[in-house]
Image (cartoon, rainbow, N blue to C red):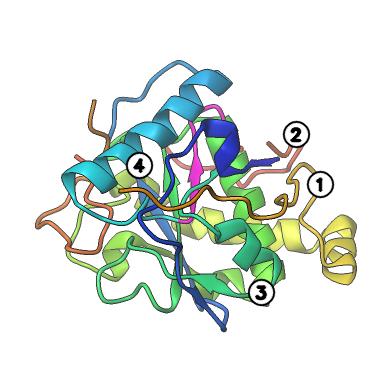
Amino acid sequence: MVHPRPDWKARPPRRPATILNKAPDRIVVHHTSTPNSPDTSLEHAYRLSRDIQRFHMDARGWDDTGQQLTISRGGIVMEGRNRSLRAIRSGKLVLGAQALNHNSHTIGIENEGTYGSEDPPDALWSALVEVCAWLCVRYDLHPAAAIVGHRDLTDTDCPGDRLYALLPDLRSDVALRLSSPDALAVAEDEGPPPGLLGDPPFTEPASRSSRPGTASRRPDAEGLSLPRSLKGFPRTKRAH
């Protein structure tokens, strides 16, 4: 299930996000560089999304949350920037603020935690595989080429050395997920994979006028710069 913005009580954006009439060619994996919290609750996940939005809007002065999707350490998937789910369902791209100089062709997934030396928890990993598979189906992308780390595009440590080293595993796991029979059904039915719900009609309120984050070697004017729920999925064995 992808929890839309009303679920986590998102603030209205300063202005509606721009929807580009094209698909992204890259799925960008981020981490928040926040503490690796043991709290896997829905309440914690919603608070994470609010904290990210508050930092992006109040500290960075952006119109809204920078990334399109957020995954908590408990594997809870949430819509980030406004209109993101609507755009994904229509095969289009919401213009985000998550990869400096690359926002017009990428979609970003923010993963809660710090992964310089620690692996992401199983729940987050499984959800990340599921979300990447969903995006690959929606946008007709091949995981081997499409899935990249934030550092592949900008001068940043994100998504952490450990998570970055696991990206080959992620690409393999997503490819395996896409080879399953229900993935084919997703493509034929043009719906999200099992466990990921579509977004309701867009009802963002009218515009009105703890710091999480991605550790970076330099601040990105348009980057995040913030300081698994597929049960039984046959995961690639990850080296430790």
Q: First in sequence: mark 1 or mark 2? A: 1
Q: Amino acid at mark 4?
A: Gln
C-alpha span from label 4 to label 3: 24 Å
User: Disc 3 vs disc 1: which is toward the camera?
Assistant: 3
Q: Is residue 183 left or right of residue 159?
A: right
Q: Main secondary structure of the magenta part?
A: loop
Which residue in the protein does label 4 denote? Answer: 53
C-alpha span from label 3 to label 1: 18 Å
User: Disc 1 vs disc 2: which is toward the camera?
Assistant: 1
Q: Residues within 10 Å of mark 4 (few under 14, many from 20)?
A: many
Q: Residues within 10 Å of mark 2 (few under 14, many from 20)?
A: few
Q: Residue at x 74, y 41 (%)?
A: 233
Q: Residue 90: which quarter of the image?
A: bottom right
In this view, the residue in front, 77 or 124, is 77
Q: Amino acid at mark 3?
A: Gly
Q: First in sequence: mark 4 or mark 3? A: 4
Which residue in the protein does label 1 denote? Answer: 194
User: Disc 1 vs disc 4: which is toward the camera?
Assistant: 4
Which residue in the protein does label 3 denote? Answer: 91
Q: First in sequence: mark 1 or mark 4? A: 4
